[in-house]
Amino acid sequence: MLGFKMKTFRRSSAFPQPADRTSLSTAGVGPTRPRPDEGSTAIITVLMTGMTLASIIAITTQVSLGTRRTAADDATSARLLMAAESGLAGFLDRTRRAGVGYSGANNSASMNTVLAQMIDGSPMNSFSVPGATVSIKVNKTIPATFASLNDLNAIDVTSTATSGSDRSSVTQRFTVKRGNLPKLNIPGALTSYPGVNLNGNASIGGATIDAPDRAVFASYLNLKRRDAQSTVKGVPLVMDATGSLLPRLKALQPGSYVRLPLADASGAVLPGAPTGLFRVDATDSAAQTVTLTPTSLPSGVLTPFLPTSVPADLVRNALIAVSASSLIIQNSETFIQGDTVSIRLGTETYTAKVSSTPVNTSAGTTFSVGSWAPGTPTAAALLTFSEGQPVSKSTLGVVTARSFSRGKTDPVGGVMENASAAVVPSPLNDTLFTQTFGMSPDSLQALSTVVTEAQFSANSKAIDGLTWLTSSDHSLNLNNEKITGKGILIVDGDLTVNQNQSGACDMNGVLYVRGNLRIQGNLQLCGAIVVEGSVLNNDNEVISIDYSDTALAGTGRKIQYDPNVLYDVTQGTGKVAFSSLVGSWRQQ
């Protein structure tokens, strides 16, 4: 047996690693033969890499195209949303313009009929914007039905923008408020720029001086106390007006005054029904509340409370300040130089003559007074006046810029002939009209329901709110038909009335005749009449004056001055205002 020993070699760093076949070959070691599976692995790797790249390209292309489509859809949606939003803005803009009337509106369907009216040659409820058509619809009214717009609290308006098959809709709630007309400036029961001829047994009723305590609009508003809070002079309190006439609540202006009977802690009216005077600080027609501050409480009542439920009297002419030579009042009636006023100071009732032309200031209406009876009040008496206490006044039966011809009876309240331009200005340039209503004929007509003589006859002469009666020849005859209702009737042109009314005060309000007036029969109107005597052209512009007398004949009282009616007909007959309700916007 051959004996020899095998030498064992250790791997050294001087030798390349087995995996580095190139190095082994370089070192003189023979090349290693490739393994059989290495070629197929490379092919598979290349194929997988290609497939992966193709997938990435396909996915990238799809995402890119989808992104473009989404971006295009988003752009369309944004554009239509902006167009729909412009519809809500357009609704506010168009309803604020002149010429929008709401006669006959009493639910959402009839409100949409109103929106179909033409404004600037296109209907209010549809218009075009670049790239879309916008339509507007009232889909809800609150309440669902209402007798007049004064009873409407809010509406839901939906604006929809459409472009082809794409559309976007938004809805907004708008609160509704109908403004009041400015205070009427009417100095007498009948105010006429031409002369006045009173014939036969016809009569006219102005107003003689009355007790100051009666110079209120009795039971104007129903109020309820919210808790058993006692009244303290100068401390505001809130009362519930639920159940009151909503138009009157909306018409109650901050700065006006009301009179309320006082009660004990249980809410029962105190014996003798003592009253307090309260200044109106704020009203909330939505919550139906009134915030009042007591300005005068009766002496001898330690802790007067508000009654559980009671009608509140509105003070028509509230005293703000008084001296021996002047008065400052917050007034709803017209005061002119020569009127008689009456106030209570302490236990005495005083009368005085208005001795200057009243001037409207931020504090109220200011005028001088004189000829006190039974004598000039003492300084001590003047200190007893209460802020907001009623002031009574006389009102002339006839005020004319020319002459007056008497019939068998004298007008109650007296007559003023040759009235100055400050009292009865010329109708030229619409001066008399503007002084009476506080706005131009065009502005007031835009708020009116405009009807022709034929339409007026078809409606049985029923007045409702502000009505403007037109005629192609500026000559209207109302014979044997009854003028009824409540509101203001303005007539473009001459008016002849020959009627037999069924009762007193079938019409309550103001009759304003831009031409001449002749009344026969026994028409009885409660409120006031104003006559211009104007001659109008085809555009209803005053071009001259016809001085033919305003003629009243027949029997009975033709006109009875009523200050409460004159106040009432201006409330809630002004421009309709819509206001967006914060937080009610929603996209559909």
Image (tube, rainbow, N blue to C red):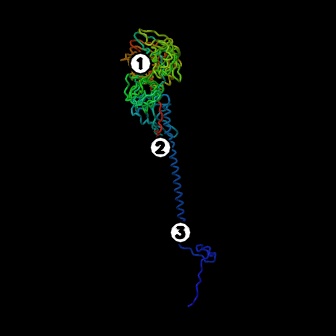
Check disc 2: other Cα within 10 Å, few if <14, some if 14-19, many if 20+. few
Q: Which mark is residue 483?
A: none
* Of 409 and 295, the residue lying toward us: 295
Q: Amino acid at mark 2?
A: Asp
Q: Is residue 513 above or below residue 68?
A: above
Q: In the picture provided, is 11 more to the left or to the right than 321? A: right
The residue that mark 3 highlights is 41
Check disc 1: other Cα within 10 Å, few if <14, some if 14-19, many if 20+. many
Q: Which mark is residue 526?
A: 1
- Quarter of the rendering occupied by the C terminus: top left
Label 2 secondary element? strand
Q: Amino acid at mark 3?
A: Thr
Which picture quadrant has residue 569?
top left
Q: Is residue 309 above or below residue 67?
A: above
Check disc 3: other Cα within 10 Å, few if <14, some if 14-19, many if 20+. few
Which picture quadrant has residue 449?
top left
Q: Is residue 38 above or below residue 336?
A: below
The residue that mark 2 highlights is 166
Q: Does residue 219 show up?
A: yes
* Of 205 and 258, the residue lying toward us: 258
Measured as percent of width and height from the top left, residue 303 is found at: 42, 27
Q: Amino acid at mark 1?
A: Cys
- Of the numbered discs 1 and 3, the one sitting upstream in the chain is 3
